[in-house]
Image (spheres, helix red, strand yellow):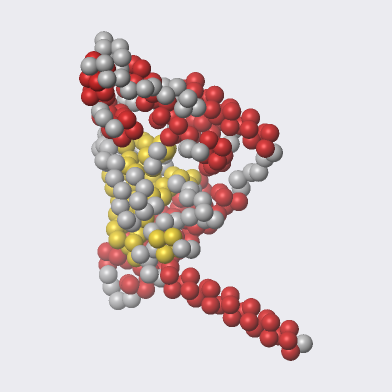
Amino acid sequence: MENEYQSMSISSSQITRTYNNKLKDILQAEVAFIGNIETTPDWKMKPHTHEYCEIVYIKGGSGKVYIGQDEYDATPGDLFVYNRGVVHFEHSSVDNPLYFKVIVIDNLFLDGEFNSIKVAGHSIQKVELKEKEQDFEQTFDKLLSEISENSFGSYLKIKSLLLEIITFLLREIYHIVIKMPKIRPDIKDQFVKDMVRYIQDNFHKSISLTDIANHTYRSIYYSSHVFKEAMGDSPMNSIIKLRIEKAKTLLMDFSLSVGEIASQIGYDDVHYFSNIFKKIVGISPTNYRKQLESNSLVPIDNSIL
């Protein structure tokens, strides 16, 4: 009996030590910025990265959010996570501009990750809060108010509210991860083939991860995860590569302007298309066309998907 208690004591001590170490790490987290952002019609942030972890909650309006190579529809109740070092930007719709809440977190150490919020290695970029919007908004507003007032004891209250938000988000991501269904390999293969076929048929349109997920009747998280696991790249990155290869072909038609080509392959913003093209090919569409004129042809890859 004594040995059993000793064993339980050691186990309890190990658990306590692990808990204390994690608590010590998470307590270093601090708010670098918090605020409400109201945009104008067709407003667009420049693509950028930073060393912080940023949480964006869509309060009103509509538009698009771009994270890495992935494009998401942004509507009220959606919450987005920009982890450290990941390229991201927002783009408001013309008729219903975005209004969102932002929290930028620094010194966040979470399970070996710095300024990144992940669960079991999964980096979920979009969370649909649905019936939990009010819970998040109330905590956010309390945090903003506490920081603005900066009264006696505010530091402890700010830390408490920040941890509450981080915990809330971790639990939401956890519920997404554990609900990812496991399907038989043969069914998974067909699932991936369906996504590939849909992308090949529609890459020239303005499609998003939501459209791909709706086509397969699965969540955007599961669709993206399975596709990347099978193909080695994300669905949106594959779409971009297909668009660029198609653009190379269209650039051979000198009667088409760069703007017309951008529109034909699913890009409304010619400047965004030019930036993407240059990032992947190494030169701008205009300079690529000049190479074509001088017979300095660049090979076209027809085996993207």
User: Vertically, is 240 above or below 16?
Assistant: above
Where's residue 293, x and y in %?
23, 15
**Which quadrant of the view contains residue 97?**
top left
Residue at the (42%, 38%) spot, across then down: 70
Task: Identify which residue, 44 or 289, lies in the foreground.
Answer: 289
- Residue reaching furthest to the front: 296
Q: Would you say 221 lies left or right of 142 here? A: right
**Which quadrant of the view contains residue 104?**
bottom left
Residue at the (29%, 45%) spot, across then down: 48
Where's residue 162, x and y in %?
40, 64
Task: Identify which residue, 185 or 265, lies in the foreground.
Answer: 185
User: Vertically, is 278 above or below 25?
Assistant: above
- Residue reaching furthest to the top: 255
Is any part of residue 192 visible from this angle?
yes
Where's residue 47, x and y in %?
29, 41
**Which quadrant of the view contains residue 66?**
top left
Q: Would you say 210 lies left or right of 281 here? A: right
Is any part of residue 56 visible from this angle?
no
Report how many numbered discs are placed on residues in the image: 0
Where's residue 297, x and y in %?
30, 19
User: Vertically, is 301 above or below 256?
Assistant: below
- The quadrant of the image that shows the N terminus is bottom right
Residue at the (22%, 16%) spot, across then down: 294
- Residue reaching furthest to the bottom: 2
Q: Would you say 15 lies left or right of 294 here? A: right
Residue at the (40%, 60%) spot, across then down: 114
